[in-house]
Image (cartoon, rainbow, N blue to C red):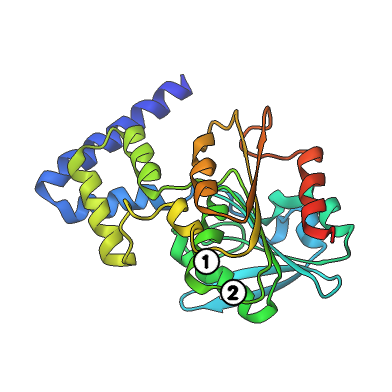
Amino acid sequence: MNKFFKTFSIKLIGLYINLLSYIFPEQATKLAYKFFSEPRDGRLKPESIPEILKQAEIETVSLENYNFPIYKWKGNETKILLVHGWESNASRWEPMFPYLQKSGATILAIDGPAHGLSSGVECNVPQYADFINTVFQKYEPQILIGHSLGGLTCLYFQHQFKAASLQKMVLLGAPSDLEVIIQNYANLLQLNKKVIQLMHTYFLNRFKINPVEFTGTNLASSLSVLGILSHDADDEAVHFGESKKIASGWKNATFIETKGLGHSMHDKALYQQIEKFLFSS
């Protein structure tokens, strides 16, 4: 019954936005983007953060009108930055920690905009990439690991900022094409073509991004760093073929296909492969 009412509510929202697009297109655009960009999960309260995050030094950084935490687990001069995905937070990396900590590396992690302990109400790739860039300017990590939307943001970050310190990158279950993400969202709400076009115009005007051209293939084609791309064949959140698109443009990446892990991709064998890639000479 709850599932029925949830589905019904989503369709009602979509219908309202569709009708609004013909009368007040600007308001329809704002509402469509609001539901597209505002996460409904992944927030943390300072008084009840997961134990793994309590073990870190937490530095709060201000960037323009936003505040976000940098979690730091001190180690040696090798620094790893972890970037989580949609409706998640930095604690999602806990299962991977034992494989990263074996090397003695310093581990850094952040909460994305409107996630975890970060401020804001919306999350978008350019803003998230600015968070990553702030960490790189301060700590100069050599390794960057991203999951899901965080993986796409890592691609965009390196494409835009070309961090000199970055040597290796690992992307797990990452989407590729912004146009696919928008279309999936439109299908969920049953939005009409007019609303989709309004969203395209919004991205172009606000972010100077053409959704049709914003693809992992294009972003990856500018990368020179070594990498691992991994995606699960049973991923129901991000289609398996999305990482294949990224791989087609990233000449220095190794593709690892998994099965049965779903979107989270937490797996001992996979993490051992990543550990070997990152730390074996």
Residue drawn at x 69%, y 49% as measured from the top left: 92
Q: Quadrant of residue 182?
A: top left
Q: Position of residue 88 (x, y in %)?
A: 60, 49
Evaluate if marks 2 and 1 touch, with contact meaning CB atoms under 8 Å apart. yes
Question: Could you tell me residue 89's position as x and y percent?
Answer: 63, 54
In this rendering, the answer to whether 159 lies above or below 59 is: above
**In this view of the protein, which residue sits in the foreground, 262 or 246?**
246
Upstream in sequence: badge 2 or badge 1: 1
Residue at image coords 64%, 69%: 69
Is residue 278 visible in the rendered image? The answer is yes
Q: Can residue 121 be seen by looking at this rendering?
A: no
Residue at the front extreme, as displayed: 251
Label 2: few (<14), some (14–19) or many (≥20) C-alpha neighbours in 10 Å? some
The quadrant of the image that shows the C terminus is: bottom right
Question: Disc number at residue 86?
Answer: none
In the image, residue 149 sits, relative to residue 155, either above or below, namely above
Q: Mark 2 points at which residue?
A: 163
How far from the left and from the top, in percent, is residue 113?
A: 52, 62
Q: Name the residue under label 1.
A: 157
Around disc 1, counting alpha carbons within 10 Å, would you say few (fewer than 14), some (14 to 19), or many (20 or more)?
many
On the rendered structure, is 280 left or right of 43?
right
Q: Is mark 1 on a helix, strand or loop?
A: helix
Compare residues 44 and 203 and report the one nearer the observer. 203
For the point 27% across and 62% down, which residue is it?
204
